[in-house]
Image (cartoon, rainbow, N blue to C red):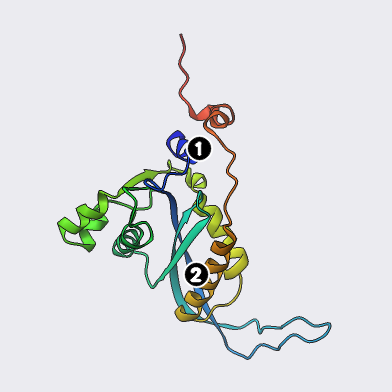
Amino acid sequence: MEDTLELYTAAEDPRYPLVCMDETPKQLVGETRTPLPAQPGQVERYDYEYQRNGVANLFLAFAPLLGWRHIEVTAHRTRVDWAYFMRDLVDIHFRDAEYIRVVLDNLNIHIRAALYEAFAPDEARRILRRLELHYTPKHGSWLNMAEIELSVLSRQCLDRRIPDHETLQREVAAWETERNAKGSSINWRFTTSDARIKLKRLYPSIES
């Protein structure tokens, strides 16, 4: 926990950018009947029936010190999908960084071996040399600022019926562009000192 909190108080350094990453599923839902458009005094109306069109996955990378985020929509959430997402982080989004400090949870796909499942050993090792992975503790994923950003995404973009992968990709790309243009970030205030007081029960008791 303190490892993550110390990262959040460090100054921004383009050589070692801080990136929080997480993912979330999105149920794809289509309409069975055409919605009735809004009219004066009447909001748009939808039929309660809907058509299930499968589930998509959204990987999110969020650099809080830069006010930047990127979302990748994938058909699945596998180790290989995660590995490709991390390669893009290294080779596209932060290609000039010496290494990227990544905050992430302990999901079973977030492992170094995933890179070796997706790429040849030399390529996997090249990517891993550019990644410094910082895992949040068990039951401590709330320490990952990417969770907050996904909550904002859910409220502002995903809280409605989205029928297919293409529409989802288009909608989240528009949200991402607008939020990046504003430089929106998170004012994180929970520090190591706060943790030692408010979460004292989690620390071992040392008696003299």
The three-letter code of the residue at mark 1 reads Thr
User: In this rendering, is residue 149 above or below 157?
Assistant: above
Residue 140: tell me if it is visible.
yes
**Residue at position x 61%, y 74% in the image:** 160
**Residue at position x 50%, y 44% in the image:** 143
The residue furthest bottom is: 34
**Residue at position x 61%, y 83% in the image:** 49
The residue identified by callout 1 is 9
Q: Nearer the viewer, mark 1 or mark 2?
A: 1
Give the CA distance from mark 1 to mark 2: 32 Å
Snapshot quadrant of residue 149: bottom right
Which of the two residues, 43 or 133, is positioned nearer the viewer here? 133
Decide which of tag 1 and tag 2 comes sooner along the chain: 1
Q: How crowded is mark 1: few (under 14 residues within 10 Å), some or many (20 or more)?
A: few
Snapshot quadrant of residue 77: bottom left
Q: Where residue 145 sits: x, y (%)?
A: 51, 49
Q: Where residue 165 sits: x, y (%)?
A: 45, 78
Q: Residues at badges 1 and 2 in contact (C-beta under 8 Å)?
A: no
Q: How crowded is mark 2: few (under 14 residues within 10 Å), some or many (20 or more)?
A: some
Q: Where residue 103 sits: x, y (%)?
A: 42, 47
Q: Where residue 182 sits: x, y (%)?
A: 59, 61
Which of the two residues, 132 or 195, is positioned nearer the viewer here? 132
**Residue at position x 62%, y 66% in the image:** 156
Residue 103: tell me if it is visible.
no
The residue identified by callout 2 is 26
Q: Is residue 133 left or right of residue 173?
A: left
Snapshot quadrant of residue 155: bottom right
The three-letter code of the residue at mark 2 reads Lys
Which of the two residues, 82 or 66, is positioned nearer the viewer here? 66
Mark 2 secondary-structure assignment? strand
